Every structure is written in structure tokens, then in C-alpha cells.
Image: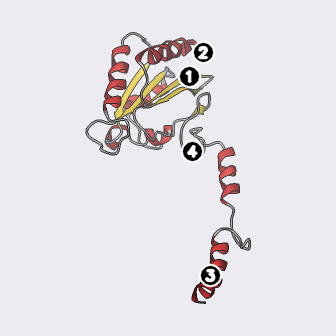
Amino acid sequence: MFSLVLASLVFPLLLAGCGGNSKGASSPVSGSSSRASAPSSSSIHSSGAPRTGTAFVLNESQPVPKSFKLAYGRKEPIVVLFYEKGQNPFYPQGLAVDSAVRSYLESLEGRYRGIGYFAYDINDPQGYGSLAAQLGIGYTPSVTLLAPSGGHYVIRGVYTGYVPRTLLAQALYDLSASRGA
């Protein structure tokens, strides 16, 4: 008998909490779809990650490294690596992946001239300011390739997690060819 009384009291509360009461309730589905369709200044879609082929506009009112801002102003192709160094017991791949991708990129840096190379430790906010947030970086290692195109930048590639050296080499080669675009 007690369980029937308890169920009759709890059931209406569950319905109201699950969207059963439509009066005054807002739909998270319609709210999220309107955000996804409205372009932001940095062309980051609703999940936070940048999309290849979208425009990127640097919000210069936010703190970003001076060297990055200068390269951005010169309209040169840009490669940005965000990595994590040190120990992180919750990182699924281990930080050796960050170290490997960083060393791959450093070894390729001299081969493709005319590209601005930037590497930032994700745990050092003094080093990169809001740049990681503007690029939608959530996980490391993360390599973002930006190419100048018609007075602005286009995201040419986004690589998160382990990236083989050969794939990075091809991506940098393609990016260096975009200098004249």
C-alpha cells in the first residue's frame, strides 16, 4: 500500500522533470540547433571543435601570443600545436603521444618554409592566452592548420590525438602550397 502511495506521488514529478509539462518549459533541442546554425566569429561549431574548410577570425581583443598575432596579420600559413607535458593519470593515450607529435612537427618545421609554427603547452595559460578556446581545442595533442584565403583564414586541417609523421608532412606540404592562394 505504501509503495502505491509513493508511486502516485513520484510519478507526476518524474513526468514534469522529463518534459511532460510543456507549460513554460524550454526545449534544449531547439535551443541547441539554433546555436549550431548561427556562425560565430571563430567558426567553431556547437561541439566546440573547429571544422575543416570553415573561416577563422581571430578575436584580437582576447589575449593571444604576440608572435601568433603577428603571423596572423602577415597572412602567412599557420600551424598551431597544443600539447600537454608532464603527468596526467586520466589521459587515455598517455602523454607520450603529445611528445611524439610535437617532435614530428619540430622535425618537419625547417622543411616547409613560409609557414608560421607555434607550439603551446595547454597547461600554461600565460603562453597562449585564449587561443586554444578560439580554436576549440579540447584534447591534446591537437594540430590546427590555418591558410590565408581572400583576406581571412580558412581551417585547412585539424588533427587531434596521434598523427603519423608522414601525414603531418603531407599536410604541411599542402599548407605551404596555399601561400599563394
Residue at 39 percent across and 9 percent down: it is: 111
Q: Quadrant of residue 8?
A: bottom right
**SS of the residue under disc 1:** strand
Specify the color scheme.
secondary structure
Residue 122 x %, y %: 36, 39
Query: Does 175 appear above or below 153?
Result: above
Q: Earlier in the sequence, mark 2 or mark 1?
A: 1
The quarter of the rendered structure image containing the C terminus is top right
Residue for badge 4? 47
Residue reaching furthest bottom? 1
Residue 172 x %, y %: 47, 16
Q: Quadrant of residue 79?
A: top left
Q: CA distance from mark 1 to mark 3?
A: 62 Å
Residue for badge 3? 7
Residue for badge 1? 148
Q: Nearer the viewer, mark 4 or mark 1?
A: 4
> What amino acid is found at the position of numbered circle 4 in the picture?
Ser
- Check residue 181 in the rendering and tell me which mark sits there, or answer none: 2
Query: Does 147 appear above or below 64?
Result: above
Residue reaching furthest right? 23
